[in-house]
Each structure stands twice: as structure tokens, then as C-alpha cells.
Amino acid sequence: MTRGMRILHVIPAVAPRYGGPSTAIVAMCDALNSMPGITVEVAATDADGANRYHQADWPSQKTELHLFPMDGTERTKRSLALRTWLDLNASRYDVIHTHSSWNFPIYAASRAARKHHKPLVYRPCGMLSDYTWSRNRAARFAYWLARERTNVAAATAFHCTSEAEADEVRRHRAARGEVYVVPNAIDAATWQVPVRKDVLRERCGPAAAGKPIVLFLSRLHPKKGLTDLLLPALAKMTVPVFLAIVGGPDDHAQGYEHCVREAIERLGQAGHVALLGPISSEERWAMFDDADLFVLPSHSENFGIVVAEAMARGCPVVITEGVQVRDQVLAAKAGEVVPFDVGEWAATLDSWLADSPRRCRAGTAGRLYAQEHFNWHRTAERLAEVYRRVSNVL
């Protein structure tokens, strides 16, 4: 490389409440900024549910954040200030890398990239999946015709985090850019934070005494499979078990927690489940440490960073086929991938909870695999190569 590259990452929001890409963006960009010849900055709205994200909350000392007020709805995250800034400043960057789909910031970034003839790396974050298309189909198709089809067609390249997501992108006739698979990584704290046993069990209370604990840790959203898969499977299990549900409400599924509570009561599982609510990023490591099994029964999940975190903490995992980190789980022999079927889930959970040596082997294998494959330095190297290819900066 004869000169450095400047990369701009555009994401709708960076508040931790949004999970996934919003929490990973800091580590991803810090890792890229640690590489010679690369400077990465982030542009986002100040969306944070009913509140507003503040510049002082940005945890990075390496990556500059350009933060703009949101003046639209929580769903669209419109920010005219962000659009204006992008129109004026996109020319300063060699590549624009977007995260997410179906919202105003991605439209504004794609528009600015086209205006200034800059390469656009489009990361759909699992939002071009069949599951996404099945939700609000009429409104989604209208938005596709108005904006998202142009965004996809204009992309120089696509950043996917799994082969399954790459296949989703390739099925779209509008997608003409090269597809690159660069898996996510996980926070270095995953390995650095000391193991803390009994924290989860204490939170679950006396009802969990003497029972293995199955952990669900994610936002409360219908696509996560709680009410139509996990809780019905729990009711069919024969092995004594306690389910800990950890996670806060999703802003796009207001009231779903009530549906979860209703299902617990209806299925007669009130004495076998604890709804523990949201926790801080630092607290989640202790949740994995104390769980006998981690589960993610999602209909659709782009990668599934929480699964990688569970693996890294040595917790065996059981997930659905809709969780796109499934290939890594199988390669690592860190757990099992089960079809979306209540009976099969009940039988699988019974089998795993009855076999402590099997769980121990899977936990150890998952931790070793995560250490080798889910580190940000390796991810940053691969992303840097993508940038070099699309920008022709040598």
C-alpha cells in the first residue's frame, strides 16, 4: 500500500440496547484502526429507544464517532443531519461500509456513495432473509421498490458473516456486487473476565435448586422462538430443568414480554422459568458461566454473536437451523443444530441435560474453536483485504 485508506462505517444506531451490529461495531472498528495504513470512522444517529445516545457514551478511544440527531421514527431512524453530512463528506473516504438494511441511514449512505462514486460495502445483517421478507410484506415490497433495491444494486460488494447469509444475498437478482464472507468476532473480554459461578443460580432463586439451568440470553422478540418453540418444548421435557430468560424488550416488539409471561402460565411452567430482564454487558459473562446449556431457538438470526460468546465461555449450545452461526457450531462440535420442531427440541434438551460428560466435551471444544476463529484481529485482516479489492488502493 502506497497510501492509507480511510473507511467510513455507517450504522443506524450504536446504542447497546440494539444488540448485534450495534455492539460489535466498536470492537470491529477498533481492530481495523489498529492495522497499519487504515483509518476507520463511524457515522450513526443518536437513537436509543425512548432516550438519546450521547457522544460521551461512546466507549472507543481509537475510533471517531460522528453522531447525528434522529428526527424520524424509531423504525426508520431518519436523520436529515446525517444525510447532509454524508453528502458533504463522503468524498473524503475510500470506502463506505454500511451495516443494516431497510432504514434511512443506509439509504443516505448509499445515496452519498453513488453521488461521489465511492465503493459501497453493504452488510445486510441478515435482513435480506426469507424471514424478514415474510414480515409486513406489502410495506417491505413498497420500500424495496422505492429505495432498498437501488441500495442493493449499487453495492460494490456485500459483507456477509456466514455462508447462509451469502446465499440469501446471491438469490436477489438486484445484487450484482461480489459477496465476501467475513465472520463476526467477539469481545476480548470474553476470555479475560474471570469465571463467576453461582451468579445465575442465585438470580433464579430457590426454584432452580438442584436442577440444571438452560439459559436464553437475547432480546425479547417473536422471531427468537420463545413462545412457539422453547417454552412448549420445556413443557414436554422429562428431565428436571430450569429455564433462565435473560434480556430486555425489543423496541420493534413492544408488549412481547407479556406474551412470554402468558405462555409460561398457560403451559404450566411458572415454577420452572425465571424472567430476569436485561443485564449489562459486563454481567452477561457470569450468565454463561453458570448455565448448563445455552439455547437460541430463533427463526432467523444473522450470525448469532451471543452463540459465539457462549462457546467462548465454555458453555455448550443448542440452536435452530435459522441461526447462521450453525456451521461454526457444528465444525467446533460445540453443541447441536435442531430443526424448528417442538418434539425434537424437547428430546434434544433432555438428551444434553442427561449427559454431563457430553456437555463438558462440547464446552471445551467450543472454547478452543472460538479462541482461534472469533478474534477481531483476524476479522480486521479479512475486512482490510475486502477494502483493498473494492477501492483499488494498493
Image (tube, grey):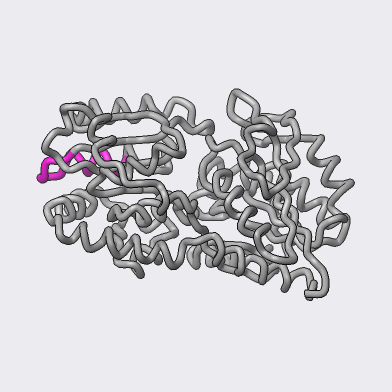
Instruction: Give the dominant element type of the magenta stretch: helix, strand or loop.
Output: helix
The quarter of the picture where residue 260 lies is: top left
Q: Quadrant of residue 6?
A: bottom right
**How far across and down, in percent of the image, does residue 60 sit?**
63, 44
The residue shown at (66%, 42%) is 12
Image quarter of the C terminus: bottom right
* Front-most of residues 343 and 381: 381
Q: Is residue 272 above or below residue 304?
A: above
Reply above or below: 144 against 14.
Answer: below
Taking the spot 28% from the left edge, 62% from the top edge, the residue there is: 364
Residue at position x 59%, y 36% in the image: 15
Q: Quadrant of residue 290?
A: top left
Q: Considering depth in this image, is 254 or 240 the residue closer to the camera?
A: 240
Q: Tell me the quarter of the image containing the N terminus.
A: bottom right
Figure check: 175 above or below 340: below
Q: Would residue 131 appear left or right of 94 to someone viewing this image?
A: left
Q: Residue at x 37, y 44 (%)?
A: 285
Q: Position of residue 58 (x, y in %)?
A: 64, 38
Q: Which residues are magenta?
A: 228-241
Residue 78 position, x and y percent, is: 73, 35
Q: Is residue 237 magenta?
A: yes
Q: Residue 5: image x %, image y %? A: 78, 64
